[in-house]
Amino acid sequence: MDMLHIRPRPGQGVYVFEFPVRIWHWTMALAVFALFITGHFIGKPLHTLSGGADDLFYLGYTIMAHYIAAFILIIGMVCRIIWAFFGNAASRQIFLPRVWDKDWWADLKSDIKWYLFLSKEPRIHMGHNPLAQLGMGVCVLDIVLMCLTGLGIYQSKTGDEFFHLFRFVQDFAYWTGGNVIDLVVWHRIGMVILVAFVILHLYMVIREELMGQTTLISTMVSGFRLVRAAKTAKESAKRQ
Amino acid sequence: MSVHTPETHYEAIRRRGISRRDFLKFCTMTAAFLGLSHSMGAKIAQALETKPRLPVIWINGLSCSCCTESFIRSSHPLAKDIILAMISLDYNDTIMAAAGDQAMAAFEETIKKYRGNYILAVEGNPPFGEEGMFCIDGGRPFLHKLETGAAGAKAVVAWGNCASWGCVQAARPNPTHVRPVHKVIHDKPVIKIPGCPAIPEVMSALVAYIVTFDSLPDVDGEGRFASFYGKHVHDQCVRRAHFDAGEFVESWDDEGARKGYCLYKMGCKGPTTFNACPATRWNNGVSYPIESGHGCLGCAEQGFWDQGSFYSRIMDIPAFGTMATAQTIGKAVGGVVVAGVAVHAALSAVSHLKKTRCEKEAAQLEAEDIATTNADAETSLKTKNAALTENEASTDAGQAASQAHTHSKKEGNES
Ligand code: HEM
Ligand code: HEM
Ligand code: SF4
Ligand code: SF4
C-alpha cells in the first residue's frame, strides 16, 4: 500500500512531502513573489526620483533581479519535474491527477461538496485532494508557460547562442500572426492567472488548516502529515 | 549600357557623377552594416567594380509607396545617388519615365533579358478578395504580375511591411484579403526587409552582398535579412541609458521629453521591434524617430496595426470580443477571485462555527449518554465481580473479567 492510502490514527505522522518537494515549494514561492513584484515594476516602472543616467541603474537592477528569480524558478521547475520520476507517490500528484481512476472522481465530488458546504465532514487526504491536484496542476502548467514566454522574450534580447534554443517560442508568436509583443502580453496574462492561483491557494490552505482534519502548512515545512484530534461528534465522544 | 561587356555597379555609380572616394566610403559602410570585418569593404569594392551589375525589377502591389518615397527622398545627394545607382532599377513603375503600354513592354522585356539573374523587389502585396480586383496592374490583377516576375527571378525581396507581413491593408478584418509575399511565392527564396517604410541602406547592402559573395545572405527564422534584424530597436537605442536609470517621459512636452528621456511609458514599441534604424538612422544618418522624440511604432513587425495604441504599452486582445487588455482582464479576474474568496470565507466561518457548536452540544449530550452507560456497565461489572468472588471456581468468568479490564485500559490510553 502506498503512503497516499495510509490512514494513520490521530497524532500519528505520515511522511508525505520529501525534502526536494519542500525545498522546491518554498524557493518557488519566494521566486514567484519576487517575479510578481519585479515584473510589475518592469511593466509599469516608477520614475526615478533623483540622479542621472550616468549613475543610476534602477530599472536595470529590477530587470536583473527578475532574471535571477526567473532562472531560480526555471532551474527549480526542471529539478521538480525530474524529481517526480524518483519521488514518492505524492510527488507525482500535481503532474498526473488520476483521472482514469473512479475513486479519484468520487473524491473530487466529495471535495466539491465540501467546498459548497453540502457536506459537513472534512475529508482526510495524505497527499493533495483532487481539487487541489487540479488547481496545482494548472498552477504548474502556468509556471511552465511563464518560463517559456519569459525565455522567448529573453532570447529575443540576448546574443547568447544557448538561449536561441528558445527561438521556437518567438517563431510560434510569429506563426500566430503577431510578434514578440504578443509574448509580453501572454506573459502578463500568465501573471494574472498565477496571482489568482496564489490568492486561492493561500485561502484554501489557511481554510483547510483551520477547518480540516489534517496539518497543512507544517506538512510543507516538515514533510509530515498529522491527522488532528478528530472533531466529529462520535469520535470526540468516544474518547471521553 | 554597353552591348558587349555588361555594365558593373561601379560604372553605373560613376556614370551618375559620384566620386571614387564616395564609392569607397559606401563600400566600407556597407561592410560595417553587414557585420563584416573592415577589410571586407575592399572586397565589396572590388566585386562592384568587376562583376556585372545585378538587375533589380521593382514592382508595386497594394501599398502606399512610402518605401519608394523613402528611397528617392534621402535628403543627402550621396545616399540617394549611390543607393539609386546600386539598385539601378531596370524597372520601377513609380519612378520610371515610361507609362502604359510602354511600361508593360519594358517589364516583359526586362524579365526576358535577365531571366534567372534579376532580383524582384516587391513593394506592397496582392489582394485575393474579389479575385484580385482590388489591385489591377496593366488590366490584370497584380497577382499575375507578381507570379510572372517571380518565375524568372533569382530571389524575391519582400520590400517593406506590406510585402513582408501585410501591413495596414492586412489589419483586421483585412477587407481585401491581402497576403504577404511569402504566402504567395513558394518556389523562390523570399528575403523580407520589413519596415514602414523599409530602410534604403538595407537594400543596397543586400545587392552589394549578393554581388560580392555570389550567394543570398542569411535570413533569420522569420525570413528577414539577418544582419539587419537581429536586434531590437530598444537594444541599440540612444535613450536606453534613461530606460535603465528609470527616467521616463511621462507626458508629451514635459521636462523629461525636453531632456530626451526614455519613451517607454509613452508607448514605445522599441523593446519588441526588430529593426536597424538606430544603427542606420534615417535621412542619411540625421536621426531616427526615437532620437527625434517619438516612440517606436513597431513598424517593422508583423501585425503592428492591430496591437493597440501607438501611445500605450498595453496591447488590445481582440480574442475577448470587446477590445480587452491584459490590464482589464487582470482587474476583472483579480476582482472576481478576491470577492469569491471573501464570500466563501464568510460562509466557511459561519458553517464552521455552527458545526463546532453543534459538535460541542452533541458531544456533551453523547458524553452524558456514554457516562450513564459506562456507569451502568460499571455497576453491572461490580455486581459480576461480586458474583465472581463468590464463585471463584468458575475460570470462564475470570477470563471475561480480565478481558473487560484490558479493553477499558486501551480506551483510556487513547484519549
Ligand atoms: C507564490 C506562491 C505559491 C505558489 C505558486 C504555490 C504553489 C504550490 C504548489 C504547486 C503546491 C503543490 C506542491 C507539490 O505537490 O509539489 C503547493 C502546495 C502547498 N503550498 Fe503552496 N504555493 C505558494 C505559496 C504558498 C504559501 C505562502 C504557503 C503558506 C502559507 C503555501 C502553502 C502550501 C501548502 C501547505 C501546500 C501543501 C498543500 C497540501 O498539503 O495539499 N504555499 N503550493
Ligand atoms: C511567475 C513568473 C513570472 C511572472 C509573474 C513574470 C512577470 C513579468 C511581468 C509582469 C513583466 C513585464 C511585462 C511588461 O513589459 O509589461 C515581465 C517581463 C519579463 N519577464 Fe517575466 N515573469 C515571470 C517569469 C519569467 C521567467 C521565468 C522569465 C525567463 C527568463 C521571464 C523573463 C522576462 C523578460 C525577459 C521580461 C521582459 C523584461 C524587459 O522588458 O527587459 N519572466 N515578467
Ligand atoms: S525610447 Fe523606446 S527603444 Fe529607446 S530605450 Fe526607451 S523603450 Fe527602449
Ligand atoms: S523606430 Fe520603430 S516605427 Fe520608427 S522606423 Fe524604426 S522600427 Fe519603424
Image (cartoon, coloured by chain):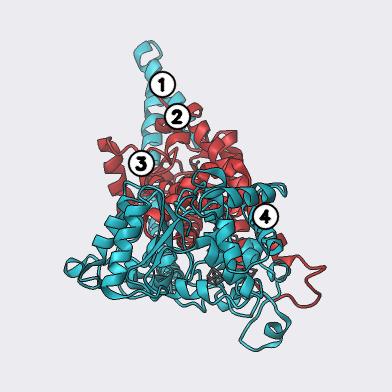
Chain colours: A red, B cyan
The residue labelled by disc 1 is: B403
The residue labelled by disc 4 is: B32
Nearer-the-camera pick, B395 or A52: A52
Between marks 1 and 4, how big is the CA–CA gap?
99 Å
Numbered mark located on residue B373 in the image: 3
In this view, the mark in front (3 or 4): 4
Nearer-the-camera pick, B272 or A31: B272
Mark 4 is on which residue type?
Answer: Ala
Residue B263's spot in the image, x, y percent? 62, 76
In this view, the mark in front (2 or 1): 2
Residue A213's spot in the image, x, y percent? 45, 46
Can residue B401 be spotted in the picture? Answer: yes
Mark 2 is on which residue type?
Answer: Met
Between marks 3 and 4, how big is the CA–CA gap?
100 Å
The residue labelled by disc 2 is: A3
Residue at the front extreme, as displayed? B4
> Is B22 above or below relative to B412?
below
Q: Are labels 4 and 2 on one chain?
A: no
Do the residues under discs 3 and 2 have CB atoms within 8 angstroms? no
Q: Are labels 3 and 1 on one chain?
A: yes
> Is A200 above or below relative to B215?
below
